[in-house]
Amino acid sequence: MKYLRHVWDHLRKDLRLEWRSRDSINGMLFFALLVVVVFGLAFDPTSYPTMTRQISGGILWVALLFASITALNQSWAREQRNNVLEAQRMAPSPASALFLGKALANMLFVLVVEAVLAPIFIVFFNLHALGNVWLLALILPLGTWALVVNGTFFAALGLRARNRELLLPLLLLPISLPALLAMVQATTGVLTADLDPIQISTWIKQLLGYDIIFTTVCILLFETVLNAE
Amino acid sequence: MEQRTPTLRNVAWLWFGISIAVLAFGFRQAIFLVPTDAAQGNVGRIFYYHVPIAMLSLIFPYINFVASLFYLYWRRREPLKALTADALALATAEVTVVYSSICLLTGMLWARAVWGIWWTWDPRLTSMLLLWLLYVSYLMLRQFSSAGQTHTLAAVLSVFAAVDVPIVYMSIRWWRTQHPAPVFGGGPDSGVDPSMLPAFYWNLAGWTVWGICIVVFRFALERRRQFAEQEAALQAIEASLEIPQ
């Protein structure tokens, strides 16, 4: 119970910081929008509706992945100002509560971006999904958590590294590839209705398993990373 | 500096000589003695290099993972032992990258000749590529991270990689396949003609002893670097303690 209160405190602090600056959400939103526009120009999606359905799941996730990397790089840099991070390290609350609060805040930011981006995406790509669209309400949060939990962890891991902006994608992408495969396959399956519902549910279960496993590993190892000297 | 007795050095040279000899013998077996494959012709001979190296490139990551766990355990308790574990983790990670690169390249050569394409997004090709990517990113992290943190962060990433590899393997497994079924222990039809076995075992033995040889060499090199670093740090401390005249 006390642990949850610590997590809630960290989450509230991050939300308040974001509410006052609105750096991450604005940056992410515009970046994701630009990626969608660039892909739209490259593929001419309105003329080829079938091809669009096949590739738009991948494009959506690539846009979100790149956008969240840009925001995740900044999320820990905030804590470095005035040596706040050193104070966090000395605080008696468990280190993983800090991590969970930060990851949940990042998750909320990316979800806001998705909520704004999805209608724009549908309009620009003239998208008409053939499968059960409500499944996306399950796939999107699970996929986002998979990206954000590892991303927040690796952003903290590369915090003191030389060129940390480059290091985050170098570490995050190889680790996330199984999750990316699962979320892109499930999304494409929903959009095209080519995949069996059983196959889609298997991909969703894999995504869920990935989320649970990596959340556990991140929570267990975060203290080591925070105090790595 | 670490004491390097002549015995140790002689053993290392002997080991090196043996690995060269076994590799040469395996080469003779694989290229000249084994009958040509009926279906693939001489191209099939790459099997004796591709499969042993693929098997070994799946074994070295385990050593890296175990060494990283020991590093994390000893980090605060016994820092000197922890450094030894870290040197072993670094050596095996580098050899993993080398072996999996060779595995991917020999596989591509074979695929071009037999399948007609260099690459396909098949489960086993993809999971080997991911293994390669993970360990390259491990080496990248070691290069980029700031000096005091490198060992810990690399050990943490190694744990992540070890968790990731089985997930990759399972998730891609039933995706789509084109790679030949496992030759050993893959089902009732698996296994090879007895005439192929000597060449295969000699090459497996050869690449194993050679792999151990380069791991130990790289380990010794990293240990010397660590000792030099400690020596320099010690001298700096001693210099700062001297009373100015």
Image (cartoon, rainbow, N blue to C red):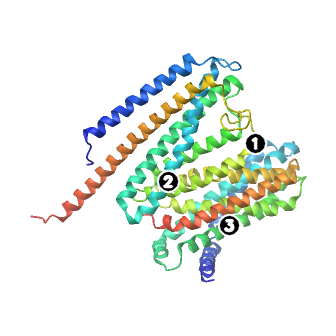
Q: Residue at x 49, y 65 (%)?
A: A224
Q: Position of residue B182 (x, y in %)?
A: 68, 36
Give me the chain letter of mark 3.
Answer: A
What amino acid does circle 1 point to? Ala
Q: Is residue A137 left or right of residue B48?
A: right
In the displayed structure, A149 sits above or below A58; it is below
Q: Give the mark, 3 or 1, whose residue is nearer the N terminus.
A: 1
Secondary element type, mark 1: helix
What amino acid does circle 3 point to? Met
In the displayed structure, A145 sits above or below A200; it is below
- In the rendered structure, find residue A107 and report the number of the disc placed on it: 3
The residue identified by callout 2 is: B66
Q: Residue at x 80, y 58 (%)?
A: A120
Q: Is residue A34 visible?
A: no
Q: Is residue B79 left or right of residue A184?
A: left
Secondary element type, mark 2: helix
- Spatial CA distance of label 1 from label 2 is 46 Å
Q: Are marks 2 and 3 in contact (CB under 8 Å)?
A: no
Secondary element type, mark 3: helix
The residue identified by callout 1 is: A42
